[in-house]
Image (cartoon, rainbow, N blue to C red):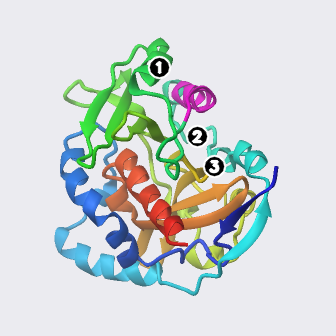
Amino acid sequence: MLRKFLLLMGITLLAACSANETEEAVNDEEDAVVEEAESTEVDEASPETAEEDNDTSEETESAEADLAEVEVETVEEEVDIAAASADKAAFGLVKDDTFTNETGQAVWEKYQEMTEEYTLKDVFIPEGSGSSSAEVEELMSDMEIEPDSMDLGNGHTLMIYHFPDDELAHENGEPFIMADMTFIFDEDDHLIHSSIAPGFYELDLSGTPNAEDLGDVISMDDLADDHDPQVFAVGEMLINEATITQALIPVDADDNTLGLYVYALGDTIVYSNGDLFFTISADFPTYSYLYFQDLVQAYSTM
């Protein structure tokens, strides 16, 4: 059955919204979440996070220019939502080396299974339902990992699974986290968002696509075939009966490396947003959810 779905067809990968607009959209939740998220045991340190604090202001201003606002054309199209939702093209950006070793690869395989087994609540249907935290824990029980939970301060709860590799360890003996799988539940304990991210990774700046080269990209297949970006998180939400998938990729923009979230319905890119990569890399799981909320807000105002 064909249903009408408003696609933001005029958005290029660099210009879904400015950094200022994104900051406003997630500011209320981010204030309540990020301070707590810093204490979450996510092993995602990156060389970019060690930059001097006094450079941050200048880089943020430059990033705002790189994510400059452009005119967005809203086009009403007939789309087969069910068929498009079944094609989770963002997942296709994950490559063999996205997750560093067999531990990470096994978690990636499990996440794909989970997306077929759990039920997402549609964030546009208040009376709808999704899998409960207990049901998700039962589905994850074969992984033999206990999750950590955190109150996001708005009635929503984050539940995260850290997957260590005991054979790889820091100098203090703590094992490297090879992957994180995250689930977000609303105030009624219904699943509304999930994501996965590598815990241990290396950013390949030499292979990062240039911002100027992404302006004409309108599909995930084009993004993969023409630019082959690294991927640092993938996730999904159910929005107005459409399953929207999300992928985080690094983008080279002059003196900045941006973390760009790209959203797709099927293969078609419908939205993008982001921030400086070193900011997002401090907590991939939490920022994946926060920036998805920006898309929800944008759609709700259409």
User: Residue 281, image x and y in percent?
Assistant: 36, 53
Q: Nearer the viewer, mark 3 or mark 1?
A: 3
Secondary structure of residue under mark 1: loop
Does residue 54 sit above or below 246 in this rendering?
below
Q: Quadrant of residue 62?
A: bottom left
Q: At numbered mark 2, what does the secondary structure look like: helix, strand or loop?
A: loop
Q: Residue at x 55, y 63 (%)?
A: 208
Amino acid at the residue labelled 1: Met
Q: Tell which of 38 and 297 is nearer to you.
A: 297
The magenta-colored residue range is 105-119
Q: Which residue occupies 48% across, 60% down?
A: 296
First in sequence, mark 3 or 1: give its number.
Answer: 1
Residue 115 in magenta? Answer: yes
Relative vertical location of residue 167 with respect to residue 210 in this rendering, above or below? above
Measured in 3D between alpha carbons, the distance from the residue under mark 3 to the one under mark 2, in whole angstroms, is: 33 Å
Q: Which mark is residue 70?
A: none
- Amino acid type of the residue that numbered disc 3 sits on in the rendered structure: Glu
- C-alpha span from label 3 to label 1: 25 Å
Q: Label 2 neighbourhood size at 10 Å, few (<14), some (14-19), many (20+)?
A: few
Residue 233 appears left or right of 86: left
Q: Which residue is mark 1?
A: 140
Is residue 25 shown in magenta? no
| Residue at the disc numbered 2 | 97
Foreground label between 1 and 2 = 1
Circle 3 is placed at which residue position?
241
Residue 56 percent coordinates (x, y): 24, 73
